């Protein structure tokens, strides 16, 4: 952010956004986010169903997500986005619905829902996902 500030003139009311993985944000980094002037944080949630999380290799409890949302707000970032994905391996309508209901309790200003793209030729970690876990046409 120091370099960006030297290269560009930032408006005092500029929105400075960051995307965060709640499972990979050490609490000691929160002060750095505040110092950088971050005003909006997007938290990657995907789906909160343990079977879906196991299939995609991303274990993240509601409690971890909630703690990250609280920590972000605790440093003054009130603009909160939550990112969900539909069409994930082992995901069903019920798990996607349950996830949506749970994240609504976090009172985010925005909830974005993205479609899953299975592209193992571009994202090597997806090659570990068995094809039989992928949902069929909706």
Image (cartoon, grey):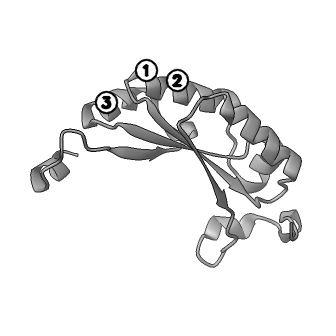
- Decide if residue 101 is on the left or right side of residue 123: right
Name the residue located 89 percent from the left edge and 68 percent from the top edge: 132
Contact between labelled residues 2 and 3, with CB atoms less than 8 Å apart: no
Contact between labelled residues 2 and 1, with CB atoms less than 8 Å apart: yes
Which sits in the foreground, 63 or 38? 38
Across and down, in percent, residue 126 comes to 68, 66
Across and down, in percent, residue 62 comes to 69, 31
Across and down, in percent, residue 104 comes to 67, 33
Which sits in the foreground, 86 or 121? 86
Does residue 57 lie above or below 123 as drawn? above
Which sits in the foreground, 95 or 132? 95
| Residue bearing the label numbered 3 | 34
- Decide if residue 110 is on the left or right side of residue 98: left
Q: Quadrant of residue 115?
A: bottom right
User: What SS does tag 3 mark?
Assistant: helix
Could you tell me how far apart the alpha carbons at marks 1 and 2 are, in whole angstroms? 6 Å
Name the residue located 61 percent from the left edge and 27 percent from the top edge: 66
Instruction: Count neighbours of disc 3 (C-alpha within 10 A) and say few if under 14, some if 14 to 19, many if 20 or more.
Output: some
Please report whichever mark, 3 or 2, sits nearer to the chain's N-terminal start.
Answer: 3
- Decide if residue 9 is on the left or right side of residue 28: left
The disc placed on residue 26 is none
Does residue 52 lie above or below 30 as drawn? below
Could you tell me how far apart the alpha carbons at marks 3 and 2 are, in whole angstroms? 14 Å
User: What SS does tag 1 mark?
Assistant: helix
| Residue bearing the label numbered 2 | 70
Please report whichever mark, 3 or 1, sits nearer to the chain's N-terminal start.
Answer: 3
Could you tell me how far apart the alpha carbons at marks 3 and 1 are, in whole angstroms? 10 Å
The disc placed on residue 74 is 1
């Amino acid at each position: 952010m120091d370099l960006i500030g030297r290269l560009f003139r930032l408006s005092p009311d500029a929105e400075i956004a960051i995307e965060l993985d709640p499972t990979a944000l050490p609490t000691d980094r929160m002060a750095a986010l505040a110092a950088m002037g971050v005003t909006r944080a997007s938290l990657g949630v995907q789906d909160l169903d343990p079977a879906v999380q196991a299939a995609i290799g991303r274990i993240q409890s509601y409690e971890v997500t909630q703690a990250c949302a609280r920590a972000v707000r605790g440093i003054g970032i009130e603009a909160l986005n939550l990112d969900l994905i539909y069409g994930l391996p082992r995901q069903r309508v019920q798990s996607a619905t349950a996830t949506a209901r749970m994240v609504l309790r976090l009172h985010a200003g925005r909830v974005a829902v993205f479609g899953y793209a299975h592209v193992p030729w571009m994202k090597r970690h997806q090659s570990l996902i068995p094809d039989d876990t992928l949902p069929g046409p909706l």
